[in-house]
Amino acid sequence: MLVAVEIILSKEYMAPLHLQKGRDVKRLLQMLKQYLNIEALKSFLTKRHGNAGRERYRRAGLTASASFISKALTLVISFVSVPLTVHYLGSERYGVWLTIGSLLTWMSMTDFGIAGNALVNLLADAHGKEDKRLAGQHAASAFWALVGLSLCIGGIFLFSFHYIPWQEVFHVSSAVPGAELSLACAYSLIFFVVGFPLSMVSSVYGAYQDGFMANIWNIAGSAIALISLIVVTQMKGGLPQLVLAISGTRTLVGFANVYYMFFRKYPWLIPRPSAVRWSSTKHLLSLGGNYMITQLAGLGIYQSQPMIITQMLGPSYVVIFVVTQKIVTLPIDLVFMGTAPFISAYGEAKARADWGWIRGAFRNSLIASLAFGIPAAATIALVAKPLIRVWAGSAAVPDSRLILWLSLYTLIGVAMLSVGQLLCGLGRADILAYSLSLCAICTIGAGIIFARWWGLGGVGLSMALSKGCTATPIQLYKIRGILRANQAPALVEQPSVV
């Protein structure tokens, strides 16, 4: 939606509507019909634009549109899963399910950043240089590195699983059967290990500015997962069955996605062992190391709260915080989906030295983010309590302090998303690494202290205070210097949102 605003307000798409004074309504309707018919829509969806800058906007618009559909389905699953599961699982077992998800997210960092933005940067650079051979080497090196890591992680879990006291890890009472908890953890780990190499799929699509393809596959996986979830909840399945319904179905869809991507969409990226190059692996590890630090810091900022709350306040409080966080921080997710497609576009434009387009796209992205995010955050803050009461029940309704601090955190996050995405697209993972690491340290430390003093409201305060005082000023200062150092004239006419 945010990208659509930028496209619609660009000169190319607005020019036909500059009617001279005195044109009648009939003329306007004829022009609308011309530009909004099926053939025009088909052309926008399938026909490449001859102008490189416009083509980046077109692909970003497609990706953002598919992202919103995918996110909408994910939200449907969230809204459906809470009332379906929390009432018969109970707050403690449901809190365990949420915590398992947080632990798996932490464990995903063991890819050393290879499958994320490091791969996006290298493939986008190769795409900008139109070097398919180099792209194939990067893809093969990333795939087999992930396979090797997957085998190592699987071996570690195979030998250590029975020695881990899962009930103590999750801090649960005897009301949660040990066998059920162990089986749920086993299923989660199996799907995690099997799906580990599949994590590169979205990065490949994103590097070629075809992120809408990744979202289409996500939509398919989410739809199947929703059907499976409904079946399991109707049968009153426990934690293991819920893991099978969500993770199992998505893993199967992931395998189908990998086949399509390598053998249908990008055959030059088929991960042949002979295409693996140490130079590509070294670049991935070097760049991925900074991104891994960034990812770990991001987990500290965004995913540490369930563990902190579990240990400081008890697992039953996790539900209150997670439900509130999902609703109040929704504008960050929506703005991210609308602007994330520009990450790979920045990388491709950098390879072509198109700094004029980069500056224009960054300006438009920032303006559109603020124009949408600020009203959305204010509106959600006003309706959060009654919405949570309807969605998850009165037991999950938070106090006003938690909503206040999470809303402030959301406003800061919306404002800084475009800055972080530009840094990612330009490959400046070093700046992100140390700024977000400092933010994570402050978030976790302050969260532990403030949770003891002010409960859930203190956890929200720690998030807002840490982000506003650490990562924000550092990133703003650095991005200003980068743009000033590249004051090249624009190579293409830039659309404007003003």
Image (cartoon, helix red, strand yellow):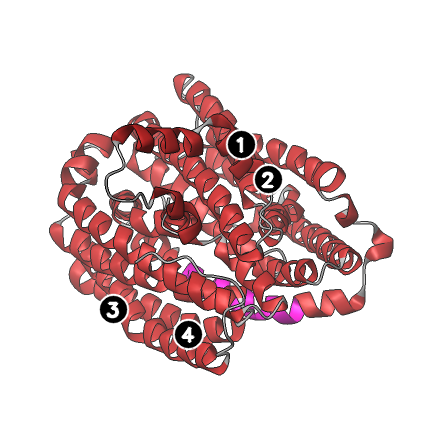
The magenta segment: 285-301
Residue at 42%, 79% in the rendered image = 478
Please say whether residue 350 is one of the residues in the magenta stretch. Answer: no
On the rendered structure, is 188 left or right of 369?
Answer: right
Identify the amino acid type marked 1.
Answer: Lys
Total marks placed:
4
Residue 465 bears which disc, if any? 3
Q: Are marks 3 and 1 in contact (CB under 8 Å)?
A: no
Residue at 53%, 57% in the rendered image = 53
Q: Nearer the viewer, residue 181 or 265?
A: 265
Indicate which label's residue lies in the foreground, 2 or 4.
2
Q: Are marks 2 and 4 in contact (CB under 8 Å)?
A: no
**According to the image, label 1 marks what residue?**
42
Cα gap from disc 2 to disc 4, whole angstroms: 40 Å
Earlier in the chain: of badge 4 and badge 1, it is: 1
**According to the image, label 2 marks what residue?**
47
Q: Are marks 2 and 1 in contact (CB under 8 Å)?
A: yes
